[in-house]
Image (cartoon, helix red, strand yellow):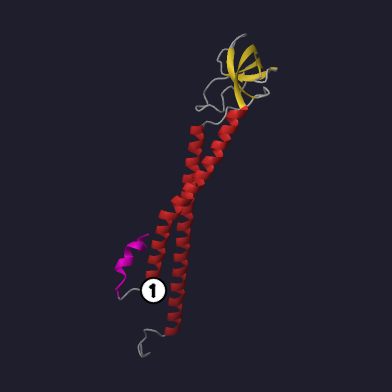
Amino acid sequence: MRAISGLWRWRHNPLRRGTDLAEAWVGLLALLLILVVGPVIGSVIGGVTQDALQRSVREQQESRRLVTATVIRKLDRSPLDADPEAASGRDVRSRVVADWTAPDGTPHKGTVMAALQTPHRGDHFSLWTDHHGRIAARPLDSATATTHAVLAGTGAALLTAGLIEGGRRLAVWRMVRRRYARWDQAWDRAGPDWGRTGTGS
């Protein structure tokens, strides 16, 4: 973006080339687009993502229920003892056979992961299920959904800024290539004897 700072300085400079001024204007236009279009696109994408995720949060909270399960017996340790959905990934969980009653009143029994370090027969723990008692993942919470929406909006704004800067660099690269081509043509017109004694140069 150095070309922008030179825009004012180049206005009346007798050494100014047309491409110098064009590069400065391209840089200024790119900066304005990054400052205006990037945040707009980021806020639009973030808003759309927020709406979709919050709708998903409401649907998950309506379709999933926390029930109390009772340990029947503990199973052998598994390499999956750490809860993959836990924030730290270090919350110890144990594989157990348990029974629970679904929100619709039907009894269920099966192998589940319990948030218990040393489960014993009769211990109680919480378990997320759907309305029919099938095990379900913990529903997405509103704060996590908002965080994902902010990240999506920020990513979209940064991607937009990167694309605009890439377009600016491509435009400047093409201008420089044209300038070099014109220089080559000027050297060709000057001829191979340019600068030699007696050639009239």
Q: Residue 46, position in %: x, y? A: 49, 44
- 176 left or right of 61? left
Vertical placement of 67 versus 171: above or below?
Answer: above
Relative depth, front residue between 126 and 9: 126
Q: Residue 108, position in %: x, y? A: 69, 17
Relative depth, front residue between 129 and 12: 129
Relative depth, front residue between 157 and 163: 157
Stretch in magenta: 1-13
Picture quarter with the C terminus: bottom left
Question: For residue 12: magenta?
Answer: yes
Identified at 48% across, 45% down, the residue is 153
Is residue 191 visible from the viewing direction of this image?
no
Is residue 140 visible from the viewing direction of this image?
yes
Vertical placement of 139 versus 14: above or below?
Answer: above
Question: For residue 97: magenta?
Answer: no
Relative depth, front residue between 23 and 194: 23
- Location of residue 58 (image quadrant): top right
Q: What is the secondary structure assignment of the residue under circle 1?
A: helix
Which residue is tagged 1?
Answer: 18
Identified at 31% across, 71% down, the residue is 11
Identified at 40% across, 71% down, the residue is 19
Q: Main secondary structure of the magenta part?
A: helix
Vertical placement of 7 versus 92: above or below?
Answer: below
- 122 left or right of 157? right
Q: Residues within 10 Å of mark 1 (few under 14, many from 20)?
A: few
- 85 left or right of 164? right
Picture quarter with the N terminus: bottom left
